Image (cartoon, coloured by chain):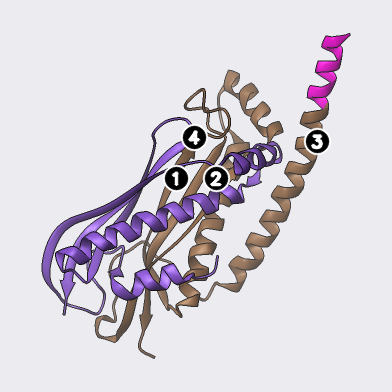
Amino acid sequence: MELTSVDLWLNKRIELTSVDCVPGKKIVAHFGIVQGSTVRARHMGSDIAAGLKNMIGGELKGYTKLLEDSRKEAMERMCRQAEMLGANAVINVRFATASITQGAAEIMAYGTAVRTE
Amino acid sequence: MEQLLQIFLFIVTIAVAYALGSIVESEHYVSIEKREKDCLSLPVVTSYKIEEKDNILEARLVYGSVVISVDYFKRFLAVLRNFTGGRLTAYESLLDRGRREAILRMKKKAQELKADIVLNMRFETFPIGGLSSAQPGASNCFEILAYGTAVRLKS
């Protein structure tokens, strides 16, 4: 799990934190909730591999990667929304997942967009 | 004859799943313990507050996730356990190593950012349908997510 370019790109433009402030900075404006979500279905190939892996237990790498990618996409959408509002940070970021139909899931990220000094 | 063969196949599958499953699990625990020792120097806390307010260089969201599933043998045991109730040890160890793995991955990202502490760490656990998503609630497969705010102090 290396830091990818997407990670760095996300972090550079918009600061994300999971606490109710940006540590070390002063918040000057609040813009309310921003959120991003994506609905993904499982890939047939990774499903078969996962089925085999399911027998002996342990990590299902295909699924881990799939959900990781989806989460990044959701975060990217959230950041875009925050940018549009003129924010430069999103505080109190939370994640949620809901299964929509069999084999598909919605991955969602939400938080409060703010501007810091 | 055919039924006998089916029962035989079932027993073989369970035996193989048991053997491989316990090898995978014990190897995972060994690697978890080793990596946990390696990153003991990075504290992870669930509180919001940080004492050194003026000394902060930067703060970043970090997270780590893992999708983990229980093996066939343990699933069979769990079904039997359902008759009597009580602790499902098989699932306890599954979730335990999932959580520890997720924390380790989060810590690794925090270390890459040269963080000194991770604040407000939170867990999310999502049951994923797995292959038996025909029956909701009978999930064999979980995604565990750990996330927090990595803080880097001015040295």
Comes first in the chain, label 3 or label 2: 3
Q: Which residue is mark 4?
A: A103
Look at mark 1 in the image and give the residue it sits on.
B125
Residue A42 in the image: state x and y as whole percent: 52, 41
Q: Give the amino acid type for the residue marked by disc 1 in the picture.
A: Thr
- Element type at marker 2? helix
Amino acid type of the residue that numbered disc 4 sits on in the rendered structure:
Gly
| Within-10-Å neighbours for mark 4: few <14, some 14–19, many 20+ | some
For this view, does A3 lie left or right of residue B79?
left
Extent of the magenta region: B1-11
Q: Is residue B28 left or right of residue B121?
A: right
What's the residue type where badge 3 is placed?
Answer: Val
Q: Tell which subunit mark 3 falls on.
A: B
Residue on which disc 2 sits: B95
Estimate the spatial distance between the alpha carbons at disc 1 and disc 3, rounded to whole Å: 28 Å
User: Mark 4 to mark 3: distance in Å?
Assistant: 27 Å
Q: Chain of mark 1?
A: B
Quarter holding residue B7:
top right
Q: CA distance from mark 3 to mark 2?
A: 22 Å
Q: What residue is disc 3 on?
A: B16
Q: Name the residue at the bottom extreme.
A: B155
User: For residue B94, what is the image quadrant?
Assistant: top right
Name the front one of labels 2 and 4: 4
Q: Residues within 10 Å of mark 1 (few under 14, many from 20)?
A: some
Asked if marks 4 and 3 fall on the same chain, the answer is no
Q: Residues within 10 Å of mark 3 (few under 14, many from 20)?
A: some
Quick one: SS at disc 1?
Answer: strand
Q: Residue at the spot x=43%, y=68% of the render?
A: A6
Q: Which chain is purple?
A: A
Q: Do the residues under discs 2 and 1 have CB atoms within 8 angstroms?
A: yes
Which is nearer the N-term, disc 1 or disc 3?
3
In this rendering, the label closer to the viewer, 3 or 2: 3
